[in-house]
Each structure stands twice: as C-alpha cells, then as structure tokens.
Image (cartoon, rainbow, N blue to C red):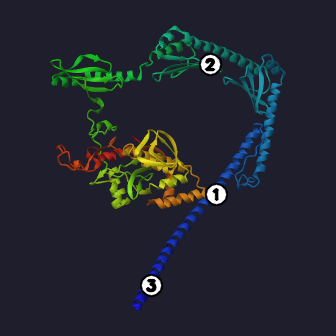
Amino acid sequence: MRKNYRLIIYIAAAAAAAFLIIFTVVLNSRVRRLTRSVESQRELILEESTQYRENDDFFNQISGMLSLDLNQTRASLGLPVARYPVLPGSNDKNTDPGRKDSVFYDAVSVMIQSEEDNRKSAAIGDFLRTQLIMDFLLQKDLKSVKVTNTQTRIEHNQLTLVSIEAASENEIVLTDFSGESLNTRTASREALYFIENSLKSLENAVLLKKRMSEQLKDIVSDPQIKKICEKSIKINNNDEDSLLFSTERNDNKIRIQVSDIYSPVFRMTGSPDFTDYDDLYSELVSRLTSFDLRTAEEVLIDNSRKEINRILDDLEFNAYLSSLNLKMSPDVREDNDYIYYDIIHSDDRRLGSFSILKKLGDIYLVDADEIPISSLKTIGIKKTLSRPSDRKLIIPENIPNINNLYSNEDSITFLLVGTHEKNTDTMILVHADKTTGKASMIGIPRDLYWKGRKINSIYQYFGPEQLNKELSLITGLNISNYIIVDMYAFIDIINILGGIEVSLDEDLVDPTYKIRENGEWSTLNYPRGTYNLNGIEALRIARSRHGSNDFDRSQRQQLVIESFLNRFRGFNLTDVDKVYGLIQAMYEYVDTDFTIFDLMSIYNAYGSSHLTGKHVLSFDNILYDTYSNIYLLDDKEAELPPDYNKGAWILLPQDNDWNNIRWYVRQIINGEL
C-alpha cells in the first residue's frame, strides 16, 4: 500500500516537474518574443529620433538664415539689429552651413547697406531743408513725417499728401495720394508745383466727400424713399458716410457708402461705383422697389399657389380629370387654416381639395368633409409603419441593392460592445474617416431580430468575431475589429481621468433605478442640464433604461462615450500614476483584438476626428416593432385569442427589407443624415 502511495507521489512530482518545464519553455518563448518586439520598437524609435534630430538641424540652419535676412531688413529701415532666440543645440556662430564665419561677411553687407541708406536719408533731408520747400510747407501748414531712413511723407490735416522716397543719394521720387509721381534731383520749382497741385486736389477731394455725405442725408429725408420704406424697410444712418437699407423678414440689404477721402465715389452693394448722385438715386429706387417684403410664411404659400396654378393650366392634367368626370372648381375657398382648390364631380359634388396649410405653406389633400388625407409630399413614397406618428425618416422608392461591404483604406469601422455580467448591454458601431476628419456612432438595438434570434444573443453563444460578421451583413459595413468593455470599467477609467462633463437635453427620471447617496436611498433623477460626473454617476446615466425608451438609452451611452473621448484628448500622458492606473483598469475590464500598437496608430490617425452625429437604429427611422410569434404567423390578418402568446418583443427593418438598413447606414457615413 505504501509502495502505491510512493508511486502516486512520484508520478505527481514528475507531472509537476513536466508542467513547470513546459511552463518555463512557453514563458521563455513569450519573453523572447516580447524582447524581440521591444528591440524592434527600440530600433524604430532610435531611427525616428535620428530623423527628428536631422530635421531639427535643418530647421535651425533655416532659422539662422532668416534671422540674418530680417536683421538686414531692419538695418535698411533704420531699426537696431535684433538678437533672435536660437533653438537649443543649434550653432548660432555659423548660420550658413556652407561657409565658416559667414556672419562676419554678412555684417559687412549690412554696414554697406546702412551707409547707403544714410546717404538717401541725407538727400531727403537736403530736399526738405531747401528754403523754397520750407517756406511753402510753413505757409500751407503742412508737416513732414519721417517713416524710415529712406522715406518721408508730407501731411495735410493728418492726411498723406505726398510721399518722398530717395531712389538714390542723387534722386528724389515724389508720389501724391492719387498715385502720380515726379522724379527730381533738386528742390526745384517743378517739385514745388507738384506738391501745390497735390494739395489743391486733396482739398477738392475733401470738399467732394463732404458734399456726398450730405447727399446721403438727403436720401434719408427724401419723400419718395420714405414712402417706399414705410412698410417694413429699415434705414440705418448712424454713420455719416454710410446708409443701410434692410428688412427684418427676409435677407434684403443694400448699403451705400462714400469711399475714402482720396477718391470719393458712391458705392452700393451689388452695383458699380457711382460718381453722379442722380444715377445713384435712380438705381436705389429701382432696387428698393424690387425688395421681397413677404414673410417666410407668405413665400411658402405663394410658392404652393404657383404650383397648384401650374397644374390647373396643364392641358394633360385637365384631360385626365375630364376622363374621370371630374374638374377643378373655378372658385378658390379660404378659411383661417387652409386655402382650398376644390376638385368636383360633373354634378358639382365635391370630391376633395388641394389645400394649402397656411401655417406651413405645404399642400395637403382633404376629402369632401375637409378632413386631411395626406400631405402631397408623401404621395407615392413608401411608408409602411407599425406606429406612423413616430416615424421621422422618409424611405425613397427603388433603393439600389447594397451587396458589397463598405471599406476603404482611409477609414475604419469597429464594434464597441458594453457588457454586464457577460450579457450584451450595448452595441455601437464606430466609423471614422481620415479624409473627412469625421466620425459617426451608430447604436444597434439588442432586440433586432436576425436569422431567428435577437442580435445580442450572438455574442453570448458565438463570440465577438461572429457578431462582427453578422453585423457586417446587416449594416453593409466592413467591421474590422471589436472592443468589449465591461460596463463597470467606466467607473475606474472615468475616475482616473478625473470625471467627465455631460449635457442632458431632456430630464432623465427612472423610478425603478434606486441610488444611495449620503446613506439615503432615492430615485435616479437628473433634470436637463450640464453635469460633471464621476464614474458611478456616468454609469447610472448610461445604464438607466426605464425612464425612457431603449433608443434614448443608446443615445445617452453615445453621449457618455463622446464626453469620455473629449476628456481623454486632454489627458496628460506624462502623469505616470494615472497612466498606470488607466492601463490596469483597461487590462482588467477590456477585451479587444486590437494590439496596443493598433490602438496607438488608430488614435494618431483618428483621435482628432469630429463626431458628426449620434445615431440609433429605431422605429423612429428605419425599424418597426412587433412580437416574434406574430411575425412568424403565416396569416398576418388572423384574429388572435386574448390569451395568445405573442412571443418576445422584436425589431425588424421596414418592409422586412434588410437592404433598407444598409441604405440608412450608408447615408449616415456619407454625411447625408
């Protein structure tokens, strides 16, 4: 018996030793593989850092050359030479990589330029100090103002009259405010006459602008203009050199201005410049009388009237009515809500009416008792609903079949699954496009009925890879990867990030969701507004389902994800403790087929994408709801006994056509919804 015990002990020891050996081999293999990966990454980082260093050296050289050029420019303008900051590690003693001590060579050039500029400055000074010019400037109360070493201007009442520039040390160029110029070598009579004529022209321009400004005031008080504007055209004349005619109802605007003092003309929005007041006035009257003064409601009504009148004048349409012993009534009726265009039988009995709803301006069909039948817009549009009042999306006729999976190298689509106790709680498709810089989230309801089962059961029984395949077939998107997150990971991750900010557009009240705070139990209640939430609070908002429908819950979950991404973008990766805590929480609660390098690449490529919308497949858009046993009935119209087992509540695509879902999803990622 003892021998048997020993034998068992020996076998157990041998098995343990074998296990340890195998474990050690496997561990060493993984360590070597990890070491190779680390070495490969280290070489890559070294190669990139070397490239960055070479780029830095190149930019440092360019920076040095630019600073030298700037100093030469400053010297030519008579400004002191500046010392620009040099990037760390740059060689500021040798700004030209091709020539040693080039700064000294360039310094000589700067000195030569400075000497030349000083000579030009002296030439301008000699011109202005000539007795002939000095007397004239004093007599006319003109001032000379130095701009640079090589340029001075003569001013009249703070207006530039003439610019003086030295072309060389022996030649002066005078340029007046209109652009005419004179080259002279001395302060001659010709130069004096040039300045004197420029002064006369400027004084005339000042008088002309003053008269034109007074004419603008005359427009405001003009009887004809006042009569045109008395209805709803507003005149704004707060600025003496400007008038604005506008309407509050429509975007009608005309601005009239007197241009600058040097070449005064009337400028009117949408018209060429005017030099003659009568031409301006005539054009203004014509433009004002053409203003559309109708309200937005009146515009819509008039458009609908035109559309109905067009069909009333159509010979083919009238022939069609005649073939049915029908005709349009010559009388148009109207009440507080509608304008009626009646269609009548040959015996004058009313069949119905084309009616314009005044409030919206849309055309509706009403019957003989004036009860609305339908909007004209929805005639001929496929619209089969389980709950018509909830539908917001109009599905067009003849949607092309979408058989291929959408994918391109500049975009990515992956599945984000939120789980709780291994049950699928949330499914969201995330699609990001590098080219457009936009991203979309599409919520997939758990009760979507696909191949005889609810879609959420696929993850539970077949795993995330199979769920990705089935959702790809349903949505028409090539879903490449998945991220599975336990909902409780939100608590730790959001707390590590320091909380998130969430704005609720509607009140969130869930009487079945009990929370305990400060030792007291209460009902989940968040009035609409903006909240700074910790992890537990964010999880409550994401998981509450009884306060509103499941689709609202999916939208709130997307709202939490969006807030999380915004918070993560501002996360400081240099905070080692927080980074370690974040990695630890993700390792414990997150399962994904992305590698860490995949996630880094995705974040670099798509991290700054703008989230364009939060979408959910629902019976508000592309789905309808029913019960599984009713759906499986052959006779849909059969009367069911009161105790009939209707089965599980499920969601299906409109008209049971899965191509509708693929069309809807394609509209979202193309930015059309």
Coordinates of residue 40 in the picture (x, y in percent): 54, 66
Compute the Cα span from label 2 to label 3: 106 Å
User: Which residue does the numbered mark 3 point to in the structure image?
Assistant: 14
* Nearest-to-viewer mark from 2 and 3: 3
Within 10 Å of disc 1 (Cα), the crowding (few <14, some 14-19, many 20+) is: few
Coordinates of residue 201 in the picture (x, y in percent): 68, 17
Disc with the residue nearer the chain's start (2 vs 3): 3
141 to 19, vertically: above or below: above
Left or right of residue 106, residue 560 in this image = left
Under mark 2, the amino acid is Pro
Identify the residue at horizontal 41%, vertical 91% (top origin). 3
Q: Quadrant of residue 415?
A: bottom left
Coordinates of residue 608 in the picture (x, y in percent): 52, 48
Residue 264's label in the rendered image is 2
Under mark 1, the amino acid is Glu
535 to 129, vertically: above or below: below
